[in-house]
């Protein structure tokens, strides 16, 4: 009886440890492209998270990182582009078709 109770306690403790060391859930954040701007214009995320941009404007746009780390094709109305951030840092980006459109993603470790 003591052995069964001891085994049960050990299993419960091991399950608890595996839950506490589980990797944090990766998230997908949304950015809307509308009215010639990115919304939100400044986004904070965590390494491993993704950002999905959706073109809700009435003209084509793209998503182009200033440092060249990511670049979408031209997005027609309703089209999306998704990118997963693997490193920490601040990533400035914009639309190469409309240079006044600027935004950034800050990625925390």
Image (cartoon, rainbow, N blue to C red):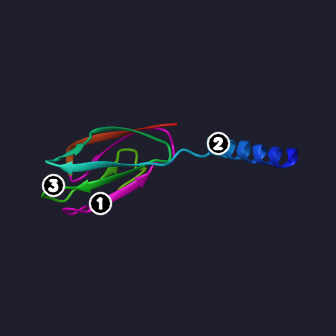
Left or right: where 3 falls relative to 31: right
Label 2 – label 3 distance at C-alpha: 42 Å
Whether residue 62 is visible to the viewer of this picture, yes or no, is no
* The image quarter in which residue 14 lies: top right
* The image quarter in which residue 72 lies: bottom left
In the image, the segment drawn in magenta is: 74-97
Q: Nearer the viewer, residue 97 or 58?
A: 58
Mark 1 / mark 2, whichever is N-terminal: 2
**Image disc number at residue 21:** 2
Q: Residue at x 52, y 37 (%)?
A: 109
Label 1 – label 2 distance at C-alpha: 34 Å
Instruction: Find disc 3 in the rendering and name its residue.
Output: 57
Instruction: Find disc 1 in the rendering and name its residue.
Output: 80
- Dot 2 falls on a residue whose secondary structure is loop
> Where's residue 33, x and y in %?
22, 50
> Where's residue 80, x and y in %?
29, 60
Mark 2 / mark 3, whichever is N-terminal: 2
- Dot 3 falls on a residue whose secondary structure is loop
């Amino acid at each position: 009886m003591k052995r069964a109770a001891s085994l049960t306690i050990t299993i419960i403790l091991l399950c608890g440890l595996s839950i506490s060391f589980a990797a944090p859930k990766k998230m997908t954040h949304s950015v809307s492209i509308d009215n010639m701007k990115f919304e939100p214009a400044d986004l904070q995320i965590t390494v491993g998270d993704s950002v999905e941009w959706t073109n809700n404007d009435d003209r084509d746009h793209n998503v182009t990182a200033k440092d060249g780390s990511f670049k979408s094709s031209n997005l027609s109305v309703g089209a999306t582009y998704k990118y997963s951030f693997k490193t920490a840092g601040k990533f400035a980006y914009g639309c190469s078709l409309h240079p006044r459109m600027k935004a950034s993603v800050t990625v925390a470790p």
